[in-house]
Image: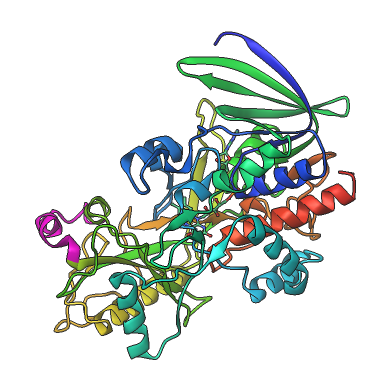
Amino acid sequence: MTGHSVLDTDILVIGSGPGGSVAATKFAEAGRSVLMVEEGEHLPLDATPHFSCEEMLHKYRSAGVGVALGKRKLAWVEGSCVGGGSEVNRGLYHRTPPYVLERWARDYGVVDLSPGEMTQHFEACEAVATVQHMPGKPSESSQALERGATKKGWTAIAAPRLYRYDTADGRGSKQSMSATFVPRFKELGGNLLADVRIQRLRRTNRTWEASGVRTSGAQKTQITIRADTVFVACGAVQTPALLRRSGIRHNVGNSLRFHPMLKIIAEFDHEVNAPGDFDPVHQIKEFEPRFGMGCSIAKPPLLAMLQAARPGNWTSIERDWRRMGIYYVQTSGGRATVRNLPGFASPLVRIHFTPEELSTLADGLRHLADVLLAAGSVRLRPCIAGYPDLDRQTGLAGLPEALEAPDGSLTSVHVFSSCPMGEDRARTATDSFGKVHGTDGLYICDASLLCTPTIANPQGTVMAVAHRNALVALDRKFG
Ligand SMILES: Cc1cc2nc3c(=O)[nH]c(=O)nc-3n(C[C@H](O)[C@H](O)[C@H](O)COP(=O)(O)OP(=O)(O)OC[C@H]3O[C@@H](n4cnc5c(N)ncnc54)[C@H](O)[C@@H]3O)c2cc1C
């Protein structure tokens, strides 16, 4: 490592995902001197095709490989680039369900977070990052799920997205952070440094010192940033890892949660998956909060990856992928911890599922199979090693009552709750507005704060909570 630079700023925001970008923009709007640093690259949204290998290499942490270890493993992914997860996700959007906010108030003592109080924060974020329903017809794979739900008499919706549709046939642009809040932040005079990983925080004489490494090509230099106030927004796994490395541990990294997901590939007797199709948007809400269902992107490499443990199916995927869709069931089970290991850059994540949580997953899988058969699927391939294919003859026989999933079948793209907020200090890492208990001038402003899983897609909640907390911090003058 060569060289060492030292920078000074009033406010330092670490991480540029939805939490960091929204908060940093509010501070820049208020005329404060703000530096936002990001470990990943700064790339335009269209620098890599969506859901491509290039995207995984440049915009995901560890090229999309992350695993929570335990008796039952869970594979998860995080974005790592300017804009964080918003750059790689589909932007399916929901405001937080009122029953979730009410639970956080009741169980964690979060104040001023009623659905009514949150409305202004959702509206303010939606004014910068547009949320719209797709104007045209959704893809055939999406409509198939809706048809199945209608046959079963279950409630299904077409979810809106963080997307601005410019034409009636559904063309437009995704409203990721790099396309919305980040340019606004920079126009307002905010400073952004990409390729900077903060490794440790230290408090000296009423100032915070953030030390880390700046990467430029093959060259690495040390960097120290001095700030009056620090907002940590590294995402729900990296935030507790950074805080714990810095000696801050009270309820930090003990309560990480996911939306664990199981998938089924459904094969139809007609084409449901044409190149250039719009992203599927239908979701089945009937059984929430126990479990929810929806459809995923089903490009051939994704179909093949999901059948990696079943080589017998590879040839048919190559031949018949246009007749196949990927569908998921998602729950909120499993509890995980985040711990640093000496000598390792990445933290160890350990997860545990109760027998009830595994039964809920199995029940969700049965419901998903049921609705897909009702939708007219001719063959279902559960994406779990050892599970048999299903069709109308076999029905649901062959699906177990409780999950027997061998390693690798559970996945998640939603992570939260590792540093919950609220006034109940026995359960929380920060106060109701993200200020870390027992510290001065240190805040969290990302998905770590969400006390429990959101059940609905979480990015809207992450943004609105960051907006709310930034306004309160400005109002209190960061006291
Ligand atoms: C594939 C995928 C699909 C998803 N689909 C949806 C969806 O359709 N709808 C939805 O609502 N949500 C979706 N999500 C979840 C959503 O993207 C996240 O909830 C959201 O991005 C979380 O925001 P955040 O600010 O907490 O963290 P992140 O978005 O994870 O951002 C954290 C940033 O901090 C950076 N960072 C980490 N550590 C450091 C460090 N030490 N120093 C400097 N920088 C650091 C990271 O590189 C990252 O860019 C999806 C996520 C993924 C990965």
Count of all numbered marks drawn on residues in the image: 0
Residue at horizontal 48 percent and vertical 54 percent from the top: 174
Q: Residues in magenta?
A: 306-322
33 and 346: which is toward the camera: 33
143 and 438: which is toward the camera: 143
- Residue 363, image x, y percentages: 38, 77
Question: What residue occupies the far top of the structure in this picture?
Answer: 2
The reply to whether residue 233 is visible in this rendering is no
The reply to whether residue 335 is visible in this rendering is yes
Residue at horizontal 39 percent and vertical 91 percent from the top: 153
416 sits to left or right of 478: left
- Residue 19, image x, y percentages: 64, 49
- Residue 320, image x, y percentages: 13, 62
181 sits to left or right of 168: right
122 relative to 33, above or below: below
Which quarter of the rendered picture does the C terminus lie within? top right
- Asked if residue 317 lies in the magenta stretch, the reply is yes
- Residue 433, image x, y percentages: 78, 54
Q: How is the image coloured?
A: rainbow
Residue at horizontal 88 percent and vertical 51 percent from the top: 475
Which quarter of the rendered picture does the N terminus lie within? top right
Q: Main secondary structure of the magenta part?
A: helix
- Name the quadrant containing residue 279: bottom left
349 sits to left or right of 387: right
- Asked if residue 220 lies in the magenta stretch, the reply is no
Residue at horizontal 78 percent and vertical 69 percent from the top: 117
90 relative to 391, above or below: above
